[in-house]
Image (tube, rainbow, N blue to C red):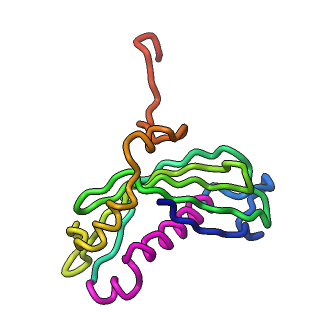
Amino acid sequence: MIFSFEATVKPEWIDYNGHMQDAYYGLVFSYAVDAMQDEVGFDAEYRARTGCTIYLLEDHKYYLREVKEADHLRIETRILNCDEKRFHLHMEMLNGDDLAAVGEFMELHVRQKPSPQAAPIPAEILQRLQAATLSGDEAAKFKHRSRSVAIERDAHST
């Protein structure tokens, strides 16, 4: 299943290089996560009723093409995996037919009171997440996937 979100690049998102500043890629991806969460049941009513919400644990982004002012973006979100408290998202930012950026996000279901702590996802929402989860073969087809970030040094480096 693909969850879709669309946005148009605003003038204030453009940096001194004439393209969308990197921080706004994160903003657009975040808005797409919000839309996907609403669609599966983590909407405003759910948050008010349960005191639970979603926290971002980790994200990785690939910047593949420049995005300019007034470009119309479509974000396609897919679920790679989920368990009782977390879900792992793969997101593609498309500018027309061009893949502009890719992001992966690990999200955590959290009960906010009395203090924030991980909490099980309700069964009916977990079932929706599981039903939308890609198979391993489908997930393996994505070219841009998260990996560890590190500066590798060999024994001869100083």
Residue 138 falls in image quadrant: top left
Task: Name the magenta segment's main secondary structure.
Answer: helix
Would residue 17 appear left or right of 63 to someone viewing this image? right
**Residue at 23% across / 71% down in the picture?**
123
Q: Position of residue 120 (x, y in %)?
A: 20, 68
Residue 61 or residue 93, whichever sits in front: 93
Inspect the magenta stretch and tell me whether residue 49 lies in it: yes
Depicted 13 relative to depicted 46: above or below: above
Q: Is residue 136 left or right of residue 3?
A: left
Q: Tell me which residue sits at (28%, 67%) in the image.
A: 126
Quarter of image, res 13: bottom right
Front residue (pair 108, 128): 128
**Residue 95 location (% of width, % of height):** 72, 56
Region rendered in magenta: 25-50
Vertical arrangement, residue 82 with respect to residue 145, above or below: below
Residue drawn at x 34%, y 83% as measured from the top left: 47
Point 58% across, 45% down: residue: 62
Q: Could you tell whether 59 is left or right of 75 in the image?
A: left
